[in-house]
Image (cartoon, coloured by chain):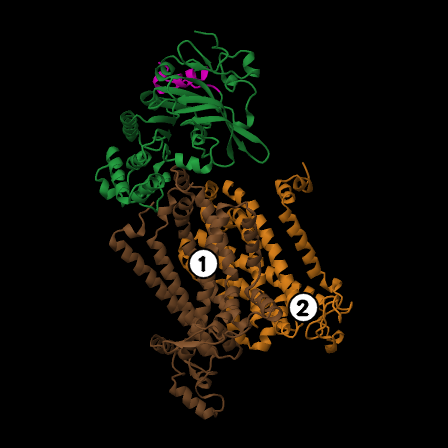
Chain colours: A green, B orange, C brown
Amino acid sequence: MAERLLDIKNLDVDFLLREKTLRAVRDVSLSIDKGQRLGIVGESGAGKSVLGFSIINLISKPGKITGGEIMFGGKDISKCSYDEMRKIRGNHISMIFQDPMMTLNPVLTIGTQMMETIMAHMDVSKKEAEAICLEKLKKVYIPSPEKRLKQYPHEFSGGMRQRIVIAISLLTNPELIIADEPTTALDVTIQAEIMELLLELCETDNMGLILITHDLAVVSEVTQRIAVLYAGRVVEIGPTSQIIESPQHPYTQGLLKALPQMAGSSNRLNQIPGMMPSLFQMPDGCPFEPRCEHKLDKCKKEIPKLTKLASGTEVACFAREGGE
Amino acid sequence: MRSRWQRFRESFFLYSFLRDPMAYVSFAIIVVLFIGAFGAPVLAPHNPYDPTTIDIMDSELPPVWSAEGSTKFLLGTDNMGRDMLSTMLYGMRISIIIGVGAVALQAFLGIVIGLLSGYISKLDNVLMRIADVQLSFSTYMIAIFIGAIFQTMFGVANYEKIAAPLLILIIGLAEWPQYARTVRASVLAERRKEYVEAARVIGLSKIRIMWRHILPNTLSPVLVISTVQVANAIMSEAALSFLGLGMPMSKPSLGSLITAGFEYIFSGSWWITIFPGFLLVLLVLVINLMGDWVRDYLNPKLYKG
Amino acid sequence: MGLPFRLLPKKHMFAFTVKRIAQALLVMLIISMIGFSIKSAFGDPVRELVGERVTPEERAQIRERLGLNDPFMVQYGRFLKNAVQGDLGRSFFFKKPVTEVIIAKAPATLELVFCASLIVILFSVPLGIYSAIHPKRFFSRFVMGGSIVGVSMPVFLTAIMLIYIFSVELKWLPSFGRGETVTIFGWWESGMLTWDGIKHLIMPSIALSSIMLPLFIRLIRSEMMEVLESEYVKYAWAKGLMPRRVWLVHAFKNTLLPVITVGGVQLGIMVAFTILTETVFQWQGMGSMFIESVERADTALMVSYIVVVGAIFVVVNTIVDLIYGLVNPTVRVAGRK
């Protein structure tokens, strides 16, 4: 079997506060092959952004990786030195943040912000670096790229800014792009354009993509596999088509039913009753148990592990084990 | 109903206060200093204002631990023969009174002007322009200028007679813009809130709204800057005294003592300047530390409230 | 969120500048009027001209000749006219025109302020940045602790302490005066060109900087800490840039903006403190001149100092405002949480 691009095994991420330790990511395992596109779905607070940042070890203090491994390029990058990690960030693994207005430094030109990425990782002359910048700007369909290099972020629209950010992420020809809610801050009409662009780029250059989002619609169009995150745990992971058409975990089912398209004749949205537990008050057993329709006695006391079903999807649910 | 004392004992205020060593140590030192200052008539071994007890032959005696020191004058004597310890205690009292008095005046002026400015937009422009100009001149500068002008007006002798209240006036006048700006910002923020709209609809007069409704809510930021302002006022008074525009040598504040003692460090009587200097720094330092703590404590709440 | 100043249409930029300058002139006018009122109320121009031994008749004659019986506004107008031409009256003590006295003393003060500012900038920037990046290290805490103490010590006390330690006890540095000075450009007496002069400059500069330094350290540190939490700094880390670049290019550039504004205003405080420092060190600059003029009731000199210093403030503040407008803050609103 070809080596996986990224292989996360049993990852734990804790936040060490003064009085207690909160676990934001619990025992998460997922992997992605070269050129594959994986979506990480979950609601706010489920830990998806933390997971994304932990891959490049950029979690805000007081967060820390406290368990598990992240295998990339044959090494466990959760434990490598600062310098080694720096050489991977922005170079082999690029990241796209949510709001491009906040991400781009307002007092530096686009050109500076692009060139510095190249100069930090690649041994090229300034002229060559500039050529690369222009090439990538063209790839994201930004008109008159030569003029753009001297301009400042606020001179662009939201959609253009995100394209620039995508261009920056392509500069070093990374193997993997992590996109954290890349379209949430943009207009709906622009969202589709940006997602199409990402899709096209990943396909042409055979880049891996981890798309972190709460938007099921977006994820269904772009990704090949989906991992559903709930309260810091992966509760279901499998091929996109299967997850969308026949979700197995009660939470995933609830999510899909809650989509406006599924509202049904009564025109009322199907909500999942209750709320996701906060990190301060995590139940001992399955985190979804309080809201679950299919709960068993076991669910309150034990935490279900991911088990593979015949269809290829993995599910962490006692009610589904041994089924299908 | 729990009594006020009980509520205080269980309050978050007391809790965070006791947890922060800087807070309670500073507070303890402030209490000790205040007791020393205001208890001076009782605590001081001598009365530095009574000329009959002062003997010029006693001047420039070193502190008790030196060879020529005596237990009669624990920290030595100054150039006029006054006991250092006693004069320092009385001096600290004057410094504190002027500091607190000046802040009371600044706060009063600042709050009134801030309220008017925030509520009546026609006055706002003018008042704030004046405040800005005054602030940009640095309050030390203004205090020194006003002091210089007053001294020219009254003549040195008269000036010294009314030095204490005059200093309160000077420093009060110099620093009101700080308070005015803070209060005005609060007022502007509060004005937008619904309860003010409601009060206006009911028909309450402007003054009543300002006094009963808006004012209590602006007190929090006022408290925050007050501690630091007291420290600043004490330092301003010391600076003015140093320049000869402050308290005279007959009723010295810590600043005047330092000034008087300055020339004597060259002849070896270092204690005349160093001891009052140390006391002044200690006083201002602990007030600043308390002020920092108060500010950190009140600020997060300000944002939530 | 507006566009930065430099990108506004030309006419807006112009209007802004004109407005600021007009405001500055208005303030100058008011200061000069206040100054003049004081002078005319308490000064005695006759004495300034001819001293004290003058008979009452001669006095009345001179008063008439000087136009001292004219209405206030006329006298004020005359004052303004003279002032604009550089004539601010005569110092009764020095028996010279005020402008001459001030110009003679200015270099001493200016050099002192320059050296103190140098100290402040050279030390506050690295110390501020360092304690922002590594706030929990012992050195950072030490610097912050030192800052609070520094802010609690009045300038003249610092000066006195310095003199006591370095002049009296250790006998390393001289305790008063400017030392050897060299005249350059025909009139500027500089103390910076001789080793002796520099030795005399050391303690006063340190004393003068002692209040500003802690202020700036704390300011730079708190601004920098806020900037370090912003999204764009996080993104810079995500791009794998070298730490030095992230700190100095991405973070520090954004810290500079608020620091510049505050910095301009602090200059005002610096001038106030020259009065104190010069008095302690018997430094023959404008500050000690002012205090002496108060003691001698030399109103012309005293008032002129106030007016000149006022003018300096207004000019500096206007320039700072204009610079700030050029590097407009609305730009930096983006990217902050």
Q: How many marks?
A: 2
Q: Quadrant of residue B99?
A: bottom right
- Residue B141 in the image: above or below residue A68: below
Q: Is residue B145 left or right of residue B129?
A: right
Residue furthest to the left in view is A144
In contact (CB < 8 Å): disc 2 and disc 1 = no
| A282 is within the stretch colored magenta | no
Q: Quadrant of the N terminus of chain A?
A: top left
* Residues flagged by tags 2 and 1 on a common chain: no
Q: Residues within 10 Å of mark 1 (few under 14, many from 20)?
A: some
Q: Chain of mark 1?
A: C
Q: Is residue B228 left or right of residue C244?
A: right
Q: Chain of mark 2?
A: B
Q: Where is mark 2, residue-wise?
A: B271
The reply to whether residue B115 is visible in this rendering is no
Amino acid on which disc 2 is placed: Trp
Rendered location of residue B164, percent (x, y)? 61, 68
Secondary structure beneath disc 2?
Answer: helix
The disc at residue A120 is none
Rendered location of residue A39, percent (x, y)? 38, 23
Residues drawn in magenta: A250-273
Residue visible at 41% across and 71% down in the picture: C308
- Alpha carbons under labels 2 and 1: distance apart: 34 Å
Q: Residues within 10 Å of mark 2 (few under 14, many from 20)?
A: many
Q: Where is mark 1, residue-wise?
A: C121
- Residue A317 in the image: above or below residue C84: above
Rendered location of residue C180, percent (x, y)? 47, 76
